[in-house]
Image (cartoon, rainbow, N blue to C red):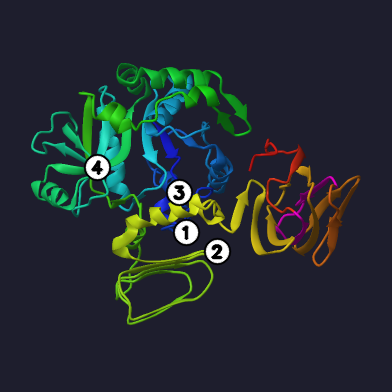
Amino acid sequence: MIPVILSGGSGTRLWPLSRKQRPKQFLPVVDEDNTLLQSTLLRLQGVSHLQPPIIVCNEDHRFMVAEQLHELNLAHQGILLEPVGRNTAPAIVLAALHALKADPDAMMLVLPADHVITDIQRFHIAIDHAEKTAKQGKLVTFGIVPNKAETGYGYIKYNKQDAEIKPLAYKVEQFVEKPDQATAESYLNDGHYLWNSGMFMFQAKNYLDSVAQYEPDILQACQVAIQKAERDIDFIRVDNKSFSSSPNISIDNAIMERSDNIALIPLDAGWNDVGSWPAVWEVGEQDEYGNVVRGNSMLHNANNNLIYTEKRLVALVGVEDLVVVDTKDATLVMHKDRAQDIKKIVQRLIDKNASEAQNHSEVYRPWGCYDCIDVGYRFQVKRITVNPGAKLSLQKHHHRAEHWVVVKGTAEVTCDDKTFLLTENQSTYIPLGSMHRLANPGKIPLEMVEVQSGGYLDEDDIERYDDQYGRSDNDK
């Protein structure tokens, strides 16, 4: 069984923590020790005859995926890079075509990278039932037993009195779009409706047969995209032009709602898609007053609030049912009932081309990260962390000079024809136009302060001459 992890979401409803360049699946939203992607992989431990995963992700997120797998010491059998988003049906086709290269009978367990499941034992039992059903040629979907009338999910109608497919799998009667509140309450009272989880199990060849039947244009586009794919370090770059020609459609709309070969496995295992801040509050550890607190906070006469702060002290007095999220460069305060309105804020930021919609102040790179501390007229100050053994590209800038001060660790500096070491409290100057490179030859992270000065300080003022990560001048 091959886990296929879909990691292409943007997670805008968890702004300002989740942003385009580092969305929620790469963040420790619920578990302080692991990101949602890492938790998705870790909860599969103990599933029998499990193969290394296939990850499908946005091209911009490739280094975060590789690093988070590395942190868990997990092997993989392919990180497939989507040059553009085309929804879940084409993404899964890419994974199926890749899986079939190694195994003509490949069994795929398709999971989004950003869900929470608390009852791991029940989850594993459901996986076992799904695998046995999928071996009978069925396309299996997991339906979540609802615990409330939820308007944010699609529903699946089934006859729970009639397990037509052994073991413990049911025939789907209907897929239903997200309902209004009254309809959702009727579904809950009816008892024959489950939430649509977006998790699936099937043999790769059976899925591709269904795609060929219902959406042949997807299969054709993805086949060419995989045939023309190129290896790039840990990654598989599918052909941009071919994949872009694929229809943009979900697996539900493309296959699950149209096929008569669908089987349903009910799942009651503490599932949550953490698609909003109230959902994070629901799965969080609540105190005696119903508050969920992450970070440095102080509360007085406050009830049923979610507080998430990265650094600063957040104090709440005499309020209830609020979400307060404080990051280094943006703060959100909202009532829990207005969670869907965050998208409107994000869209306005996008319309203004505001960086807060795209990036955090702390920006991750394959070699480490940097944090913008201060910006002013013709200057910018960054705190830079370089991982042990990592190095930046050999590069130069046309509009800025840089001063580097080592705070911790050892830096190997290349500046034009000179290479030398700097240790704590030592500094150097990189003139405008000089060819330069920064590396960490040590065993501990290198931390340094960079002061940039010049007339243009944006990140696209970079000309790369050598890069161990295979990035171009325009790449991240």
Q: CA distance from mark 2 to mark 4?
A: 35 Å
Between disc 3 and disc 2, whose residue precedes? 3
Sequence-first tag of 2 and 1: 1
Residue sitting nearer the eye, 388 or 209? 209
Q: Would you name the residue on which mark 3 appears?
A: 25
Find disc 1 in the rendering and name its residue.
Answer: 16
- Mark 1 or 3, nearer chain start: 1
In this view, the residue in front, 351 or 5, is 351
Please report the bounds of the magenta region as a residue range: 434-455
- Mark 4: give few (<14), some (14-19) or many (20+) Cα within 10 Å: some
Q: Is residue 192 something that shows in the picture?
A: yes
Q: Amino acid at mark 2?
A: Asp
Asked if disc 1 and disc 4 are in contact, CB closer than 8 Å, the reply is: no
Q: Quadrant of residue 67?
A: top right
Task: Please name the residue that numbered disc 4 is placed on.
Answer: 154
In front: mark 4 or mark 3? 4
Quarter of the image for residue 94 reads: top left
Residue that numbered label 2 is attached to: 329
Q: CA distance from mark 3 to mark 2?
A: 20 Å
Which residue corresponds to the image point at 31% horizontal and 42% vertical from the top-left? 124
Residue pictured at 40% horizontal, 47% vertical: 114
Q: Position of residue 19 (x, y in %)?
A: 49, 52
Decide which of 12, 259 is in the foreground and name it.
Answer: 12
In the image, taking residue 415 as reference, residue 278 lies left or right, namely: left
Indicate the secondary structure of the residue bearing disc 3: helix
Q: Residues within 10 Å of mark 3 (few under 14, many from 20)?
A: many
Q: Position of residue 190 (x, y in %)?
A: 9, 46
Amino acid, disc 3: Gln
Residue type for callout 4: Gly
Secondary structure of residue under mark 4:
loop
